[in-house]
Image (cartoon, rainbow, N blue to C red):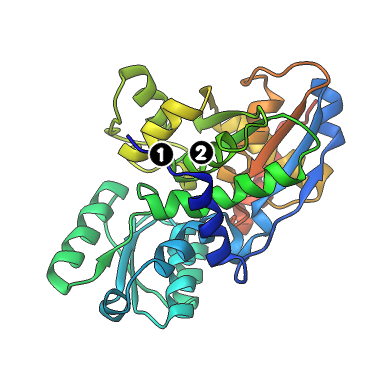
């Protein structure tokens, strides 16, 4: 297949640059000293709408023609993509409908509505995908896939371009994986740099769609998911995303919910950063040696989002295991 080229990622970055933050790349000495590396955090939790998702959503909406924008858009999301699409659609003057699982965090539901989306709560994540497809067919809305689309991948590739510019040398970059849009974009963009960066993914043990896809040699669908990290719990790996991961990512590791909670606590207490469970997964993988790193090397954990329920954050601070 034909991969996105560096010019595609650069064009996506140009489209969205005026509307998103170039998020900080912060050193994290507590983590680095414990694992023997120079550790950095790419703080997408400080991004507009609170997560990386706005990069792909903005580029996808910007790529629509005027007739498509006039029809309005529909998408499916556990929360972060819902907020991102709502925000991007409002900027473009388009109607947005978001289908969310009934168990979606109410803070994320309220935020999506606050950004202007018409929110429909419907069944499980798999049910929500089907309902969004039905609405697209019956109401003429444009379906924006939350991760499995070239425009989304290209938008997320802007994170990779920023990393390539700011890192002091070749790095091991660890990226949380849900459906795979973010890691496809980051890995694809970094591969075009020729700088020798290595990319690893990380998923929750209770939602290993991409890990299972790699093991089975095809994009797979999960019968059920069970994880605290709602942002990493779609019922499937994206077909296109799987191909990017297979081509540009060295491996995908798994972490437990307990390890994710411990990472949330570490980020809050030592880095002074609020991260949702999905956003803490890459840090958890480095904390617990799920990703191979060489002594003295440069490592980056992408902190993908900070839209955490306050009660869950309090629970992580109380119950997260101290580390190291």
Q: Is residue 273 above or below residue 139?
A: above
Q: Quadrant of the C terminus?
A: top right
Q: Which residue is mark 1?
A: 3
Query: Does dot 1 land on a helix, a strand or a loop?
Result: loop
Q: Which residue is mark 2?
A: 188
Q: Please say whether residue 205 is visible from this viewpoint.
A: no
| Viewer-nearest residue: 168 or 308 | 168
Q: Left or right of 191: which side holds 101?
A: left
Q: Earlier in the sequence, mark 1 or mark 2?
A: 1
Q: Residue at x 87, y 26 (%)?
A: 33
Numbered-mark total: 2
How crowded pointer 1 is (Cα within 10 Å; few <14, some 14-19, many 20+) is rated as few
Q: Left or right of 151: which side holds 191?
A: right
Q: Please say whether residue 7 is visible from this viewpoint.
A: yes
State which quadrant residue 166 falls in: top right
Q: Left or right of 17: which side holds 153?
A: left
| Viewer-nearest residue: 26 or 307 | 26
């Amino acid at each position: 297949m034909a991969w996105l080229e560096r010019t595609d990622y650069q064009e996506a970055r140009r489209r969205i640059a005026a509307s998103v933050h170039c998020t900080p790349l912060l050193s994290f000495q507590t983590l680095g000293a414990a694992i023997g590396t120079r550790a950095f955090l790419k703080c997408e939790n400080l991004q507009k709408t609170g997560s990386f998702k706005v990069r792909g959503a903005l580029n996808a909406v910007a790529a629509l023609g005027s007739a498509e924008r006039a029809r309005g858009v529909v998408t499916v999301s556990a929360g972060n993509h819902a907020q991102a699409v709502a925000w991007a659609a409002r900027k473009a003057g388009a109607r947005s409908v978001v289908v969310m699982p009934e168990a979606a965090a109410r803070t994320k539901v309220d935020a999506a509505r606050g950004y202007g989306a018409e929110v429909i709560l419907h069944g499980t994540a798999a049910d929500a995908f089907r309902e969004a497809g039905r609405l697209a067919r019956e109401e003429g809305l444009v379906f924006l896939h939350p991760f499995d689309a070239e425009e989304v991948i290209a938008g997320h590739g802007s994170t990779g371009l920023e990393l390539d510019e700011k890192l002091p040398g070749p790095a091991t970059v660890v990226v949380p994986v849900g459906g795979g849009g973010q890691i496809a974009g980051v890995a694809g963009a970094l591969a075009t740099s020729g700088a020798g960066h290595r990319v690893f993914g990380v998923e929750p043990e209770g939602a290993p769609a991409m890990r299972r896809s790699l093991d089975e040699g095809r994009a797979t669908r999960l019968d059920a998911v069970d994880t605290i990290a709602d942002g990493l719990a779609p019922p499937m790996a994206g077909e296109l995303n799987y191909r990017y991961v297979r081509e540009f990512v060295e491996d995908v590791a798994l972490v437990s919910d307990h390890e994710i909670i411990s990472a949330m606590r570490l980020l809050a207490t030592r880095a002074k950063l609020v991260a949702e469970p999905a956003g803490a997964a890459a840090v958890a993988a480095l904390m617990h040696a799920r990703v191979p790193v060489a002594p003295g090397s440069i490592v980056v954990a992408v902190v993908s989002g900070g839209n955490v329920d306050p009660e869950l954050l309090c629970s992580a601070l109380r119950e997260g295991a101290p580390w190291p």
